[in-house]
Amino acid sequence: MSADVQLQHVIIAMNKALAGVLIHAGIDGRQFVQFAKLGYVAAVEDACKQEGKLASISRVSRVTGLSRAESKRLLDEIRSTGQLPACTSSFEGVALHFWYTIPAFLDDEGMPAAIEFGPGDGTFSDLVASYVGETDAGALLDRLVDTGCVKREADGRLRAVKRNYSDPDALGLALSGIEMMASTIAHNKLKKHEPSMLQRQVYSHTIEPSALLMIRRLLRDKAANFCEEVDDLFSGHELAEADEIETAEPGSLMTAGLGVYYYERPTQTSDAGLFSSGDPEAAT
């Protein structure tokens, strides 16, 4: 199988998985095609900016394969609305992150302290106002309680009991993981003069189905512990004071993240042998 055919198969498989989610969300193929076109045009404009140039309609048309009229329309749309970054965090996740890392909200053992709702310093309302932003603290607390991340103690105080917030209905937030992964792949493939970013997969094609439940549980626990270590690492190198964050110069801060996911599917055979993609176990 040629490299071009392999790439085509990967792209189709990737879009198949994504399409299943988008169809469920009510986004049809025509809408997705328009989003894809916008992505192509935005990529050309970014490349031109890195060269210190302004993207021309002729270049956008030549690189993307779109007509000049459509290139102009999409380019105008991007420039008028701006290229906003994908949402990579939720209000709930931000609140839990700072509750677990800011000394003012920790007890003597370094764990999240039991705090009052507020008002006042060191309360949940203070946490939300200082580190989360303009959102309803009461509604935010209700969501954290409903998902089991926060418990109300008998004396009315609040205690965080889960460090990670997950909302299965927050599709945009979930899909942002694909954007982050694609950004890392693009960096490693297109910016070879810069140090590469971490991009690794470990897999096996010959797992016995009876072992999958144990593997899922074990990896889930190991991944959760590892992610908490990474969260602690990030917190040790981020601005801890709310006023520092608010007064930071535009473009002076960086966003860094690490994604962990688990994947399984039936093993596929191919003309090249038992395994459809390389060695039984590999890392890239």
Image (cartoon, rainbow, N blue to C red):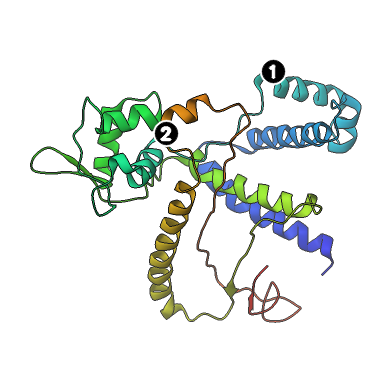
Judged left or right of residue 44, residue 184 is left
Q: Which residue is mark 1?
A: 80
Position of residue 31 in the picture relative to residue 88 (left or right): right
Q: Nearer the viewer, residue 115 or 134?
A: 115
Mark 2 and mark 1 lie on one chain; the one further toward the N terminus is 1
In the picture, the quarter occupied by the N terminus is bottom right
* Position of residue 218 measured from the top left corner of the image (x, y, whole percent): 39, 71
Residue 278, above or below 55: below
Amino acid bearing label 1: Ser
Q: Nearer the observer, disc 2 or disc 1? A: 2
**Mark 2 Cα-neighbour bin, 10 Å: few <14, some 14–19, many ≥20:** few
| Residue 122 in the image: above or below residue 216 | above
Residues under numbered marks 2 and 1 in contact, where contact means CB atoms less than 8 Å apart: no
Provide residue 198's location: percent of width, then percent of height: 64, 59
Q: Amino acid at mark 2?
A: Glu
Residue corresponding to mark 2: 241
Rendering coords of residue 263 (x, y %): 53, 64
Image-based side of 104 in relation to 15, left or right: left
Tally the marks.
2
Position of 122 relative to 164 (above/below): above
